[in-house]
Image (cartoon, rainbow, N blue to C red):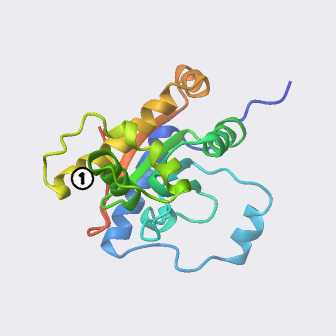
Amino acid sequence: MAARHFPPFTSDEALARLKDGNERFISGRARFPTMQKEILAELAKEQHPHTTILGCSDSRVPPELVFDASFGELFVIRVAGNVLGAAILGTLQYAGQHLHTPLFVVMGHEGCGAVDAALASKFHSAKESSRIEVLLEDIVPALRNLDGSKSHEALLHEAVEANVRYTMRSLLDTPEVQARLVEGQMKLVGAVYEIESGRVRFLE
C-alpha cells in the first residue's frame, strides 16, 4: 500500500497564507519580484501546492500575484466565469487525489464579463457565438434567484457572488469532495476579487 501523503499545511494555514499574501499585495510589499534558480531547481523535482484555485481567465486577476504567492504554492485553474466542466472537474480531482491540497478556493471577480454576458442572456435574451453560449449555460443557473429590476451595477455585483456560490455547491455535491470533507483535511471557500482595490473578499 502506498504511503499516505500529508500536505505541509492545513486548510486553515493555507487560507491564512492567502490572506497574508493579499495584504502584502495591496500594501505594495510583495515578496517575489524575482525567483532564485536554486528554488526553481528544487521545484522541478516535485510540487506541493498548499491551495488549489479555480478562477476566471480575466487578465486582471492573476492569483499568483493577487496572493503574493511564489512558484509551487498555488495550483491554479483558470476559465472564463470560473465555471465547472468535465476538464475542470478532472483537474480539480487531480489536485485532490494526487497533490492533496488542503484548501480549494473558487474565486470570481467584480465586473466579470462572462457573468455580465450571462445576465444579458437571462434577462434580455442576448445571443453570443455558439461556444460562448455553451459557457454561459454553466453560469445562468446561478442567477435564478436574482432580481432583474435592480441597477446593472448592483445586479452584476450580486451575480458574481451567486456564481461563485453556485460553483461551490456543485463541487460540494461531488463524491470526492464529500469524502475529503468527512476526512476533515480539506476546506472549500469562495472569494471575490475587487479589481479596483486589489482586495480579495472571502465569502462567509
Q: Residue furthest bottom?
A: 34
Residue 27, given in percent of the width and then of the height, sits at 31, 72
Residue 161, given in percent of the width and then of the height, sits at 31, 45
State the residue at coordinates (38%, 74%): 29
State the residue at coordinates (49%, 39%): 11
State the residue at coordinates (31%, 40%): 143
Q: Nearer the viewer, residue 144 or 40?
A: 144
- Residue linked to disc 1: 157
Quadrant where the image shows the C terminus? top left
Q: Nearer the viewer, residue 68 or 189?
A: 189
State the residue at coordinates (25%, 53%): 156
Is residue 195 placed above or below 115 in the rendered structure? Answer: below
Residue 58, by quadrant, is: bottom left
Q: Nearer the viewer, residue 20 or 158?
A: 158
Q: Residues within 10 Å of mark 1 (few under 14, many from 20)?
A: some
Quadrant where the image shows the N terminus? top right
Mark 1 residue type? His
Task: Describe residue 85's horizontal placement relative to residue 90 as left or right.
Answer: left
Task: Describe residue 13's horizontal placement relative to residue 190 as left or right.
Answer: right
Q: Secondary structure at mark 1?
A: helix
